[in-house]
Amino acid sequence: MTDSRARILGRIRTALAGTERTTPAPAEPIARDYRDSHTDTGLVELLAHNLADYRARVHHATETDLPDLIARLLGSRGAHTLVVPPGLPDGWLPTAAGLRAVRGTDLSAAELDAMSSVLTGCAVAVAETGTIVLDGGPGQGRRMLTLVPDHHICVVRTPDQVVASVPQALRRLDPRRPQTWISGPSATSDIELDRVEGVHGPRALDVVLLVPPGGA
Amino acid sequence: MSAVPLGMPSFPDAAREATRNPTLRRNLRHATHTIRDRRAAAVAELDDWAELRAAGAAIKDRTLRHLDTYLEQAEAAVVAAGGHVHWAADAAEANRIVTDLVRATGETEVVKVKSMATQEIGLNEALAEAGITAYETDLAELIVQLGDDRPSHILVPAIHRNRTEIRDIFRDAMGEWGIPAPDGMSDDPRELAEAARLHLREKFLRAKVGVSGANFLVAETGTLVVVESEGNGRMCLTLPETLISVVGIEKVVPTWRDLEVFLQLLPRSSTAERMNPYTSTWTGVTDGDGPRAFHLVLLDNGRTSILADEVGRQTLRCIRCSACLNVCPVYERAGGHAYGSVYPGPIGAILTPQLRGTGSAVDASLPYASTLCGACYDVCPVAIDIPEVLVHLREKVTAQRGHVIERSALRAAAWAMRDPKRYTALQRAAAAGTRALHPRRLPLPGWGKAWTDTRDLPAVPKESFRTWWQRRDTSGGTK
């Protein structure tokens, strides 16, 4: 192993022997003439549009309406069990009879497979691409939670958690945390290069855009 | 790179076969034309595409110029985050490392995320020899694996199959590998995707070892990035206890910020989406989330020899988006199998001969598998000048090998010309013996016929220039 390390690094140095190199490497400038974002206004509307374009179902609610909306979303699928991650505000949870909310901390993948739905928040949402990003922070949980159940409800606080672009999203995120960037439900283009929704990840994705009290 | 497929014919021979298959041509035409227009629309949404493309190329070029520095930085960051790093000089070493790692877990099966690097090294075959079953979990890879087939596209390895063929493969083969296809399954893509979901779910839930590649490896943080659509990647990256990622050394990018360029360039070029459904990033291991052991295998396998070629080096910018395949008129007609490698299309025509050398018939013919129309360069998100590299490789093929007949003819000519007496004698013999026998036409078979049918060969003079000159001198003719 050590030998191959030295061998590969040696081959690289030999290969680059004739190439002019400024050291240290970061001192070589990169022309970043591209935009930091392509849109500055109407970000929440753009996010809603792009989410829907990739077949996520988009809803708007205030924190007060949220439990009822979630109850309706679960009811429309006949869902009986809801997984919630640690740190999710209790006030989001519906109180409907017959629904069981389970803290997902210790569930195995097989146990999660028996759950109907999962409810989480997110770290940031990207308007231009219709993407929500989860980074395992409070109210988001382990990556497995939003993967195994077939239905994911994700709440985005607007306008605070919405950024315009990919560059802006990356600046808000900590690379040391494991992340999942989600743009619509699971899909494939593998049959005749045509997009079909629904393979291994959740086949239904509901995104709730949480409107601050008094409207955005 | 793993060996050339046994008995693989040269590109023209393989392509001739492929172009005679009307189903294949129809499937490829349908798929490549569908994606072409959608890619153009996705790219047109960004008015700074040219600047993103220039930045993508510049970042990759700088990384390559300092590849040793960035790899050492990446290694240190992965180790600091609790991962293990292994270095593999070639395919055999990479396969040995992965096999040993899987054996150490005591498991005999692994789930796999689609990965070009592991296909390049023939990992599944190597694992099978060690008694370990590798389950491909990407839908198209599953189609290829169940159909005992070869991949023919970088992004969509089963692009050569239409929905009806896929239905038949699932119906016939799923039962042998695990949960069979549902009774009465139609060829509706939705039902086919559902069958794959059911078939693979039990494998995901019981898997203890996952094997992946990576789209990017961030040097400053040690973060790996996998871009996918179906969620099979997320399954393999998060459910198993052990994760092994085989990553080509050219996949490194210097900083987390650099992803802002590639996460815009890749999805739009590849699946023509603003963003692919799922992107996973992870740095080493995280308590209580995902695998408890993470191994990164850094793979050379010919990449450093590409790095040594200043014209060919740009090939290593490639982010495996496959846009060049989808616009290529040659790929559209010949299909991916004719390229004799896991890397088909224009990028394969330059990557394979550089990774594998030009010793076999197919590899020596690959730089010619192009009309040099330049469509591949236009769509390449990191501006690889594929035609430039093709021409460069053609020069190399000609210089290193020459055409066998041409080379032996030149060698004979050199022997004859080194000695004037020998030359004269041979020329006279040739004139006397054969001049009268030269045909006026050269009847070539096949498509050469179209040329020779309408053209006469130039008439051969009755005597050579030298004979004529000498005769003229001795007869004391006018000057």
Image (spheres, rainbow, N blue to C red):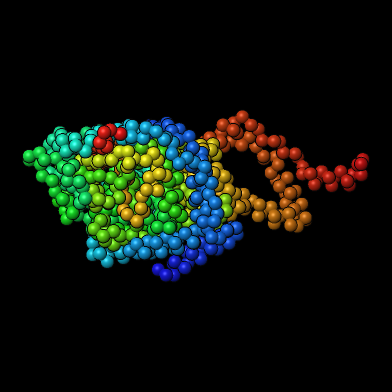
The percent coordinates of residue B446 (x first, y second) are 52, 36
Q: Residue at x 47, y 67 (%)?
A: A7
Query: Does residue A163 lie above or below B63 as drawn?
Result: above
Q: Nearer the viewer, residue B314 or A183?
A: A183
- Would you identify the image quadrant in which residue A169 lies? top left
Left or right of B244, for residue B185 = left
Residue A89 visible? The answer is: yes
The percent coordinates of residue A44 (x first, y second) are 33, 34
Query: Does residue B432 lie above or below B219 as drawn?
Result: above
Residue B165 visible? The answer is: no
Which image quarter holds the C terminus of chain B? top right
Residue projecting furthest to the left: A97
The percent coordinates of residue A51 (x first, y second) are 31, 35
Q: Nearer the viewer, residue B253 or B19?
A: B253
Q: Residue at x 57, y 44 (%)?
A: B388
Q: Residue at x 44, y 67 (%)?
A: A4
How many numbered dots are placed on residues in this image? 0
Left or right of B197, for residue B13 = right
Which image quarter holds the N terminus of chain B? bottom left
